[in-house]
Structures are given as structure tokens and as C-alpha cells.
Amino acid sequence: MSIRSGVHKKGTITLTEIINSIKRKEGFRNIGAVATFIGIVREKTQKGAKVQKLELEAYEEKANEVLAKICDDLKKKEGVMDVQIHHLLGKFDVGEDLVYVMVAGSHRKNVFSALKEAVERYKKEAPIFKKEYAITQEGKKVAYWTEEKEAV
């Protein structure tokens, strides 16, 4: 079973399934390193508000297209054999996984830079939207899309 990079409803894909899909790929015996980034819901916002939960939505068709392009671009780098980005959608509590990014390559030096680029690019390029429900330091309950920087 091949797993495609993209957005997935929470609970429909696991990190173990992603790792196993990499191990099943042709040429896996030439892979010497797999680097993983797991994005997790933090308890505090950058301004100190206490996060209660997150809600993630996406323009799914475009997000899948963008994530696939990022992966395809990075697979062209020397020594990179596979790149997968799996962003979850739905409602999340503090401590839950939001995104899995994996890069497999011939050597560790090849995978670390590609992993960093994959994370930076999906955050900037993919149309994935995050609504934060939080309690400010003053005790006020707020809910806002993260693009609304002035909210908290």
C-alpha cells in the first residue's frame, strides 16, 4: 500500500504506517537515514495564552497539490530518496500530533537539510488553516485563526 503525502482527517493515518511505507519502497536497502519531524499542539501561544484546543482545516485539493510538489522538489536533491508530508485535519487537544514530515536518504547529511526545508515550505506554502481556542493571561477566552496575529 502506497501512502500519498497530503492532508488527512485526524485518525486516518499513523506514524507507524508512514514509516512502514518508506521501508516498503523499492531501493530501501540504499537508505541510510530517515529523519522525522512531528508537529505537536503546544500548551502556550507565543504570547503566553493557554491553548485549549486547535481546529485545522484546509483547501484540501490545493494543499495536496502543494505538499506533493514540495516532496517532488526535495526528492531531486542529492542523496534524498523519499520525502513525505502528512498534515492532519480536525480538532486537536494539547499534546496531539498535527503533522508528520519524513525524509529518507542515503546519509544523514542529506536528510537533515531537506527535512528543514520541507517543514519551512509547508508552513509557508500549503493552504492549511489553524483556529486556536485559548485563554489569555488575563483569563479571557478567545478563539481566532492564527493569521489574526493581534488576537492573542
Image (cartoon, rainbow, N blue to C red):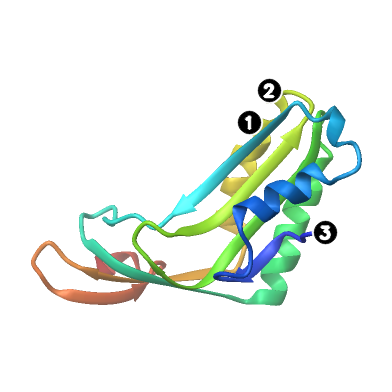
Q: Residues within 10 Å of mark 1 (few under 14, many from 20)?
A: many
**Distance in Å between CA atoms under marks 1 and 2:** 6 Å
| Rendered residue at 20%/55% (across/down) | 48
Say whether residue 79 is left or right of residue 19: right
Q: Residue shown at 79%/47% (left/top)? A: 73
- The quarter of the rendered structure image containing the N terminus is bottom right
Residue that carries the numbered disc 1 in the rendered image: 112
Numbered disc in front, either 1 or 3: 3
Q: Nearer the viewer, residue 95 or 20?
A: 20
Q: Give the residue type that dot 3 points to.
A: Ser
Circle 1 SS class = helix
Ranked by sequence position, the earlier of labels 1 and 3 is: 3
Residue 128: x percent and y percent? 56, 68
- Quarter of the image for residue 102 reads top right
Which tag, 2 or 3, sits closer to the chain's start?
3
Give the amino acid type for the residue marked by disc 2 in the picture. Lys
Q: Which residue is mark 3?
A: 2
Query: Which mark's residue is nearer the viewer, 2 or 3?
Result: 3
Whole-angstrom CA distance, mark 1 to mark 3, is: 24 Å
Which mark, residue 143?
none
**Left of 38 or right of it: where is 30?**
right
Q: Residue at x 66, y 75 (%)?
A: 60
Disc 2: CA contacts within 10 A as few (<14), some (14-19) or many (>=20) = few
Q: Are marks 1 and 3 in contact (CB under 8 Å)?
A: no
> On residue 109, which mark appears?
2
Q: Which residue type does callout 1 highlight?
A: Phe
Q: Residues within 10 Å of mark 3 (few under 14, many from 20)?
A: few
For image coordinates 23% across by 75% down, the residue present is 142
> SS of the residue at dot 2?
helix
